[in-house]
Image (cartoon, helix red, strand yellow):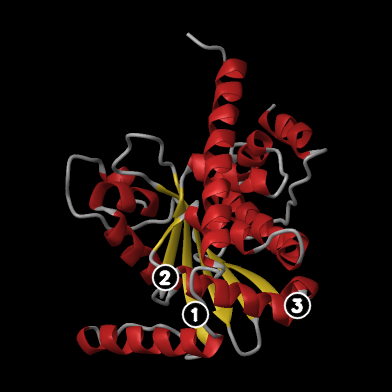
């Protein structure tokens, strides 16, 4: 019964209340304990990753994790809304972080990439990787993504619609327009592969343009708020150590060391999100 405009206002209000509550809790915890919820050096993180890999390789010797000095973090955007138990993997990006040279490779996989799914009550035309997560479970979907990318993830990070909207608002970006840009595909000749590349370009731009805030107004409390807004099997100390390493390396000042790839390969164009012009550009493409 609500109009679209009313729904957006209600959603924004609810999101603000949730974010405010998380921030208050984080500040309270930080003030009470005086510690950033545990800490670790990057050497300790690398050692922990090596132990995890060794234990996994004992049972799966043919798995490839890549180089010892690299940490693979699979970032997934899910079409999850409240009450959904089988979300699709709509945005798929493997971050490979070199913790010696401090470079980042982002390998994107279009959601429509073919993936085998165990037989069920769905058509063969639905055998693509986003559906692997929904029809056979997130764990199975991640396994299929790893096969396409060529390396196994050390950690995964997932976020649904509301989580992404909350995160972009913390970075002072317009939530609705940003999500429209990240989800749009109809206006491109190759469709989904261009959308997937747009998402990778957006995340690279976010690192270049926003990482410096963690040296200033984004203290440990805000870092913890961001951490609690996603789902991950990475502990906070590990994430904070990687973030600190990125800050110390000045990766945001070295854009050429953030490299974008796609599996399988498609010819794409770099489109950058601009809050002032992107909504108008999207309208043109939709027309």
Which residue is disc 2 drawn over?
155
Give the percent coordinates (x, y) of residue 126. 32, 44
Q: Residues within 10 Å of mark 3 (few under 14, many from 20)?
A: some
Closer to us: 234 or 24: 24
What is the spatial separation of the Cα atoms under label 1 and label 3, in whole angstroms? 18 Å
Give the percent coordinates (x, y) of residue 268. 66, 57
Give the percent coordinates (x, y) of residue 88. 38, 46
> Looking at the rendering, which quadrant does residue 222 occupy?
bottom right
Look at 76% across and 39% down and name the residue there.
Answer: 278
Q: Is residue 221 left or right of residue 115?
A: right
Q: Is residue 31 left or right of residue 56?
A: right
The quadrant of the picture occupied by the C terminus is: top right
The answer to whether 103 is drawn above or below residue 136 in the figure is below
Closer to the N terminus: mark 1 or mark 3?
1
Look at 80% across and 73% down and name the residue there.
Answer: 253
Which residue, as the protein is rendered here, is positioned at the far right?
A: 276
Closer to us: 192 or 9: 9
Which residue is disc 1 drawn over?
71
Label 3's element?
Answer: loop
Q: Confirm or deny contact between disc 2 and disc 1 (CB under 8 A).
A: yes
Which label is found at residue 250?
Answer: 3
- Tell us which disc is closer to us: 1 or 3: 3
Look at 29% across and 41% down and name the residue there.
Answer: 85
Closer to the N terminus: mark 2 or mark 1?
1
Give the percent coordinates (x, y) of residue 210. 74, 59
Q: Confirm or deny contact between disc 3 and disc 2 (CB under 8 A).
A: no
């Amino acid at each position: 019964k609500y109009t679209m405009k009313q729904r957006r206002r209600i959603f924004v209000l609810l999101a603000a209340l949730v974010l405010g509550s998380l921030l208050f809790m984080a500040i309270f915890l930080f003030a009470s304990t005086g510690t950033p919820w545990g800490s670790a050096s990057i050497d300790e993180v690398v050692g922990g990753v090596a132990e995890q890999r060794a234990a996994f390789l004992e049972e799966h010797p043919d798995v490839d994790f890549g180089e010892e000095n690299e940490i693979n973090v699979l970032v997934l955007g899910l079409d999850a809304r409240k009450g959904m138990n089988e979300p699709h993997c709509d945005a798929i990006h493997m971050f490979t972080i070199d913790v010696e040279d401090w470079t980042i490779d982002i390998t994107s996989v279009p959601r429509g990439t073919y993936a085998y799914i165990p037989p069920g009550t769905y058509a063969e035309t639905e055998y693509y990787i986003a559906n692997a997560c929904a029809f056979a479970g997130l764990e199975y979907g991640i396994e299929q993504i790893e096969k396409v990318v060529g390396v196994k993830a050390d950690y995964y990070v997932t976020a649904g619609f509301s989580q992404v909207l909350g995160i972009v608002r913390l970075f002072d970006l317009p939530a609705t327009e940003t999500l429209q840009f990240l989800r749009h595909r109809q206006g491109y000749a190759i469709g989904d592969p261009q959308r997937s590349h747009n998402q990778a370009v957006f995340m690279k731009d976010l690192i270049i343009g926003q990482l410096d805030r963690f040296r200033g107004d984004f203290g440990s409390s805000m870092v913890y708020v961001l951490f609690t807004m996603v789902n991950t099997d990475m502990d906070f100390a590990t994430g904070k150590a990687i973030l600190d390493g990125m800050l110390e390396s000045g990766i945001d000042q070295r854009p050429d060391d953030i490299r974008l790839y796609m599996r399988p390969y498609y010819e794409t164009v770099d489109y950058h999100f601009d809050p002032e012009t992107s909504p108008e550009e999207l309208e043109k493409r939709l027309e």
